[in-house]
Image (cartoon, coloured by chain):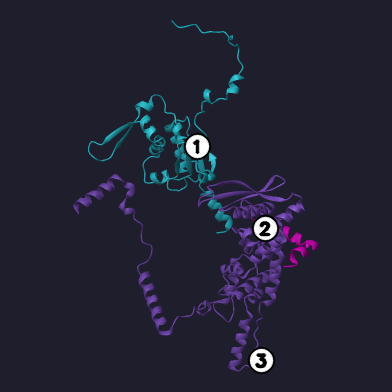
Amino acid sequence: MSITQRVQQWATFGRVWHVYDCSYQNPFDSAKVIVKYLKGMQKPIYHPMNDCGDHVVCINTKQIALPGDEWTKRAYFHHTGYPSSATWTLAWELHSKDPMMIMKKAIYRSLGGNLQRRHTMQRLHLFKDDKVPQEVLDNITNQIRQLRPVPQRLDHIDQEVIDNFPKIMDYPEDYLPKAIK
Amino acid sequence: MTLLRIASRAVLTLHPTISLLNQQKANVARWVRPTLMEIRARKKKLEIKNGPQKESPRSNFIEWNYDAEIYAFGIRLKEKFNYTLLQQAFVDRSYIVQEEMKQRSVGVENPSLNLSDNSALAKKGEELITEFVISFLNLSLPKFPRDGIKAIYRHLVSDEVLLKVSQSIGTKDLILSSNYPPMNDVYVATLKAIIGALFESSGEARAYEFIRDFICTQLNQVDVNELWKIENPMELLKEICKDKKLGEPEPRLINNAGQNTILAVHYVGIYANKKQLGTGFGENIQIAKEEAVKDSLRTLFQTNNNMKPFNFRMPVEKVANLLKKPALAAASVDNI
């Protein structure tokens, strides 16, 4: 095999590192997308028995957004194996204990069950905020598009922009709202 | 047992396609195996007694008609040979020497054989191969540099390639040589002599077609870039860019993945005047750069991985016309 053919093979089976920003994203919908990259399903060489999955770095897992009343209604079951040690932890409670756990469990669940699942999970790197070690950052060369736009919060906008925002009218300086009785 | 019979009957009645009667018939006769075993046992016995047996030439057997075999050789190749010339093409110098020695040992003073060896024909054949192969390559790879053409030519006329061709057209039992099986250089010389004999018998066009069909076709599925080892590809690329006024070539990193891991991939492109000449991958930047340079050269030479396959049906007149132009012919055949 010549060097040209060898590097062609090398490039074909090279693992790309993707980054996914979890802020304001539904973890269950995001998991379906991330799993495709972890398994390498976006590649033309994909086959269930072909080890061609990529790495995915999930950042800002603390900022995930659960739909509806999931924070208070979704329960995570755990059993240590000892009698009467079953626990049901609510999503908000689990999230306050470990901000990466909901994302991890969502991805683990949507990977489906087979013997490769734990090996595939090794290629997932979770970070609760955007503080990622430099040696991990250096590997990343691609970004997975977020599923929904991140809303802009009023308290994150500069005061100057707010002041200069066009307005139809200004309240008079001596304006007082009507007192509530 | 009864249960099995019932079950098999059920299969027969339910699935007529899986009929048990439709079994394949054994087509090897019952006597073949014991006979082969007996032959093998006797051979082994002989080997134990006398040491390893030499391969016996086919001509040592009783029903061997050399003239018929020579005639059949030409017919198999669908060529019209002059019988005398073709027979001469198979005679090696060592055979004549051996026969003369035999006659002397018997007591003949002036041994004479009505045979002449194939060296003259081989020389003619070699000339034909050189001029045709070089012109064929020049026509097929118009952008490939002269040194590269020379390297491909050297591969095509190397002993390994010609030996393979010679053995494949069945010269082994027809060659008259002092050794059996013949030495490698005898095989090669015989092939050249056959081409020389074909030239003398049927003319230039048939000889060229023979070379095209049997020698040029050895390039099929071969990566011509691998046949030419470029010492310093970057220097060569710089020279070519200077000649073609493409600008100074420079490598640039297009992409990479997992650069801190053991599976790092780097993707480098070569650019000249902001135009991409070629790209290459590698596990480090150095290798990726070298590959990109090689890819750029391949693109410039039009010998990329997706190049058109060689036209082995190219009319030989086209190649012969190129040879008729004296300047081109001299340039193509010289310095080889």
* Magenta stretch in the rendered image: B310-336
> Looking at the rendered structure, which numbered label has been put on residue B233?
2
Q: Nearer the viewer, residue B134 or A64?
A: A64
Colour chosen for chain B: purple
User: As drawn, is B291 to the left or to the right of A153?
Assistant: right
Give the percent coordinates (x, y) of residue A54.
Answer: 48, 44
Give the percent coordinates (x, y) of residue B87.
Answer: 63, 76
Check residue B327 for magenta coloring.
yes
**Amino acid type of disc 2?**
Pro
Q: Tag 1's secondary structure?
A: loop
Residues indicated by labels 2 and 1 sit on the same polypeptide chain = no
The quarter of the picture where residue B106 lies is: bottom right
Q: Tag 2's secondary structure?
A: helix
Q: Report the Cα–Cα distance between label 3 and label 1.
A: 101 Å
Q: Which residue is mark 1?
A: A130
Q: Residue at x 63, y 79 (%)?
A: B92
Return the chain for callout 3: B
The vertical placement of B33 against A1, above or below, is below
Q: Are marks 2 and 1 in contact (CB under 8 Å)?
A: no
Q: Residue at x 61, y 58 (%)?
A: B223
Q: Which chain is rendered cyan in the image?
A: A
Q: Nearer the viewer, residue A12 or B290?
A: B290
The quarter of the picture where residue B301 lies is: bottom right
Specify whether residue B205 is in view.
no
Specify whether residue A90 is in view.
yes
Q: Provide the major secondary structure of the magenta segment.
A: helix
